[in-house]
Image (cartoon, rainbow, N blue to C red):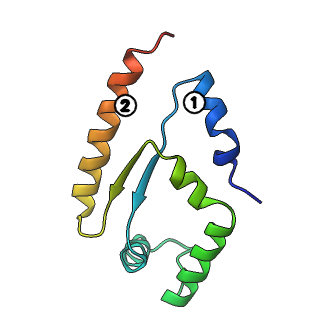
Amino acid sequence: MELEVTKNFWYFKKVEFAKLLAIHASSSKRYENIKARNRSDTPGNFERFINRDKREISVGIRKAIALADESIFNNDSSLLDLYNQVEEVVKEWSKEFSKVDK
């Protein structure tokens, strides 16, 4: 099973304005972040988290990341820094979108 985004991304990119943002972080940073969110589906330990990562890779998350128009590296950033970086990327994309014929 492959992620729908990899099947449909180029179609949407050709027909409409579409962008994809990848946010990279180490496994330990991602585990720290997911634990902090404390959602009901949070893996109980690092080993379960790694197994979840392997499942996501098996459904094509790497392909989606490879299609990204922009990437942000988030190993040493605070959540506020990450929000600011994302906001800057989205502002640039908004400028591009405003130039697209509608």
In the image, which disc is placed on residue 71? none
Q: Residue 13's x, y, as percent? A: 57, 30
Q: Which residue is mark 1?
A: 13
Residue 33 falls in which quadrant of the image? bottom left
Amino acid type of the residue tagged 1 in the rendering: Lys
Does residue 45 appear in the picture of this structure?
Answer: no
Q: Quadrant of the N terminus?
A: bottom right
Mark 1 vs 2: CB contact within 8 A: no
Kindly identify the residue that appears in the image at 51 percent across and 10 percent down: 102
Does residue 58 appear in the picture of this structure?
Answer: yes
Element under disc 2: helix
Amino acid type of the residue tagged 2 in the rendering: Trp
Q: Residue 8's x, y, as percent? A: 68, 39
Q: Is residue 47 above or below residue 95?
A: below
Q: Which residue is mark 2?
A: 93
Q: Residue furthest front?
A: 66
Residue 58 falls in which quadrant of the image? bottom right
Q: Is residue 100 above or below residue 9?
A: above
Q: Earlier in the sequence, mark 1 or mark 2?
A: 1
Say whether residue 7 is left or right of residue 37: right
What is the spatial separation of the Cα atoms under label 1 and label 2, in whole angstroms? Answer: 13 Å
